């Protein structure tokens, strides 16, 4: 239980249904959808689409999604709602043009957005209410406007410079970044959603809306075609899992990097994390070194599932044991790639649980803040830049080529025990997400923290040689980490954001929501 003398959040408890997400309006809409007779999938989609209006710098209908969901007495299922590169695109062409990476703010980085296909498919196969009902709240707020929340305004100001051409018209208010409380509306997107509600996914992927997207991308040098859009299809996949202290961490398989979280936990299992001070330099150091090695494996192996052949190697206990042996408890490694060679030959999250026990873990993103910065001219659909997740390394499994899906940083999570799902959860924050999943699990299992406390707790992340340590850690911890060889900094922006719902044995739902975001958990 938290100390009520100090600022903090209490968990939210209910029995009939629960949503936890990063914006209060989306949480409210999800709960209202449950009350109207919808199930957890209806509610998750209704809330997620609305988040594209509430947090346009994070997500939108020009993005991708991944979903884990479960029903009582049934296995956890997974849907891949990520898009593919245009059929004629080739990494070799970008290399020939002098590029070493995919230019992130160009049409070359825009894969065909697939979230809308996923939402339409899931509504039909798993939902109860139908698209017209579940899209109605987002249509209303797209037209009426949403007051800009504080964290959203902060992120908007940081990322607005990436907006290009028509995107500046659609995503600035009177030519400026909106202030906290200013109304933001996108009436053209309301029209898009209205057509999808009436005619389904074909309204988005064919006809006038698709033509607007294709023309806008081709005007920026893209190779997207009508066939690329018409053939877009979300695909069901098989979840992957690993066990940490009796709890299964269930992740979406590649092309996500969920396996990175599994590998990281498997490495941490070789250390006495529970015997450490939870907010000590010792724990932060071991976690950072495990992350370096797990992310190096990610960079080597993860890609579109049709091209990723080393997943079994990443998930193998022997791989984790060999990597754990490379960690020096007193000294930071300079180059994880050189060490591990001997072993390896911006986003929203929403979770909903309904009264029948259906649980949905859904993550939905346009990648960087405001994605590619490119929006379609007529309807203002902002495009993700997930193609920046490809590599241009010749022959790499994640090399950019036509029809492939890039390695994705967004991962929905779910915890299970004795074969039963007990907690859908997610951690936002781009590359941080696998590290965030591992830290959340160890906070719960090694230190016995409640979900809300586990989310509130300070975070650190070793990212590209920079050890980001939140202000929640002491200066003494930062000094010790620096002495160990870490290049330490305090990040300008809090690390990530998380949401979770614990399905308790007594039938009560316990929701937790990250104070680093504007959102909340709500139940009824």
Image (cartoon, rainbow, N blue to C red):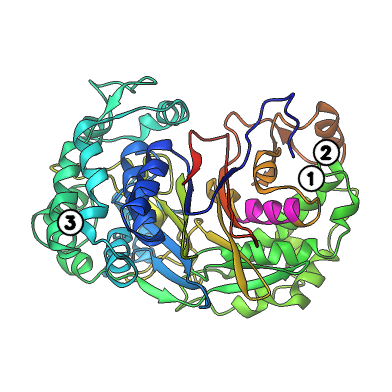
Q: Residues within 10 Å of mark 2 (few under 14, many from 20)?
A: many
Q: Are marks 3 and 2 in contact (CB under 8 Å)?
A: no
Residue 481 - label: 2
Query: Gap in Å between the C-alphas at discs 1 and 3?
Result: 47 Å
* Residue 335 appears in view: no
Earlier in the chain: of badge 2 and badge 1, it is 1
The reply, left or right, for residue 225 in relation to residue 244 is: left
Q: Indicate which disc, 1 or 3, sits on the residue closer to the N terminus.
A: 3
Quarter the N terminus occupies: top right
Left-right relation of 353 to 434: left
Q: To which residue does mark 1 refer? A: 284
Query: Residue at the spot x=21%, y=64% of the render?
Result: 229
Q: Work out how far the residue at label 3 is from the one at label 2, CA to CA, in angstroms.
A: 53 Å
**Label 2 secondary element:** helix
Tell me: residue 310, above or below residue 118.
below
**Which segment did they paint magenta?**
434-444
Q: Which residue is mark 3?
A: 197
Q: Residue at x 46, y 46 (%)?
A: 524
Are circles 1 and 3 on residues that touch, CB within 8 Å? Answer: no
Q: Secondary structure at mark 1?
A: helix
* Residue at disc 3, secondary structure: helix
Q: Main secondary structure of the magenta part?
A: helix
Q: Position of residue 264 (x, y in %)?
A: 71, 61
Which of the 4 quarters of the picture holds residue 200? bottom left
Q: Earlier in the sequence, mark 3 or mark 2?
A: 3
How far, Cα to Cα, is label 2 from label 1? 8 Å
Q: Nearer the viewer, mark 1 or mark 3?
A: 3
Based on the picture, tell me whether residue 378 belongs to the magenta stretch. no
* Picture quadrant of residue 461: top right
Check if mark 2's residue and mark 1's residue have beta carbons within 8 Å. Answer: yes
């Amino acid at each position: 239980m938290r100390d009520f003398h100090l600022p903090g959040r209490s968990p939210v408890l209910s029995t009939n249904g629960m949503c936890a997400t990063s914006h209060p309006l989306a949480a409210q809409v999800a709960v209202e959808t449950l009350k109207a007779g919808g199930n957890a999938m209806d509610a998750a989609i209704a809330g997620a689409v609305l988040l594209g209006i509430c947090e346009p710098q994070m997500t939108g209908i020009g993005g991708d999604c991944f979903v884990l969901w479960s029903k009582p007495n049934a296995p956890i299922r997974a849907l891949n709602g990520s898009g593919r590169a245009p059929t004629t695109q080739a990494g070799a062409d970008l290399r020939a043009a002098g590029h070493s990476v995919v230019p992130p703010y160009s049409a070359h980085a825009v894969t065909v957005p697939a979230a809308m296909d996923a939402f339409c498919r899931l509504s039909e196969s798993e939902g109860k209410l139908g698209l017209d009902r579940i899209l109605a709240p987002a249509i209303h707020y797209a037209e009426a406007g949403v007051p800009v929340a504080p964290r959203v305004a902060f992120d908007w100001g940081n990322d607005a410079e990436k907006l290009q051409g028509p995107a500046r018209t659609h995503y600035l208010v009177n030519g400026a970044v909106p202030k906290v409380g200013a109304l933001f509306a996108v009436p053209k997107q309301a029209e898009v959603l209205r057509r999808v509600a009436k005619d389904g996914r074909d309204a988005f992927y064919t006809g006038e809306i698709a033509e607007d997207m294709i023309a806008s991308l081709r005007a920026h040098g893209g190779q997207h075609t009508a066939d690329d859009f018409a053939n877009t299809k979300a695909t069901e996949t098989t979840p992957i899992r690993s066990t940490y202290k009796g709890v299964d961490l269930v992740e979406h398989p590649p092309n996500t990097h969920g396996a990175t979280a599994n590998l990281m936990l498997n490495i941490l299992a070789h250390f006495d994390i529970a015997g450490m001070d939870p907010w000590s330099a010792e724990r932060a150091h071991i976690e950072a070194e495990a992350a370096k090695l797990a992310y190096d494996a990610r960079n080597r192996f993860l890609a579109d599932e049709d091209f990723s052949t080393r997943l079994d190697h990443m998930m193998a206990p022997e791989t984790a044991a060999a990597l754990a042996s490379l960690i020096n408890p007193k000294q930071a490694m300079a180059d994880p790639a050189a060490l591990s060679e001997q072993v390896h030959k911006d986003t929203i999250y929403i979770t909903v649980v309904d009264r029948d026990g259906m649980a949905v873990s859904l993550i939905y993103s346009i990648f960087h803040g405001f994605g590619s910065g490119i929006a379609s001219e007529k309807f203002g659909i902002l495009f993700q830049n997930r193609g920046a997740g490809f590599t241009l390394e010749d022959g790499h499994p994640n090399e950019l080529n036509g029809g492939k899906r890039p390695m994705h940083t967004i991962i929905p999570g779910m915890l299970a025990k004795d074969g039963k799902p007990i907690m859908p959860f997610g951690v936002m924050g781009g590359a941080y997400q696998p590290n965030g999943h591992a830290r959340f699990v160890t906070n719960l299992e090694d230190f016995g923290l409640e979900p809300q406390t586990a989310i509130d707790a300070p975070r650190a992340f070793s990212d590209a040689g920079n050890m980001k340590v939140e202000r929640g850690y002491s200066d003494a911890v930062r000094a010790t980490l620096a002495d160990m060889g870490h290049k330490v900094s305090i990040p300008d922006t809090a690390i990530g954001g998380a949401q979770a719902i614990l399905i308790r044995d007594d039938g009560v739902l316990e929701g937790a929501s990250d104070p680093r975001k504007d959102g909340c958990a709500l139940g009824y």
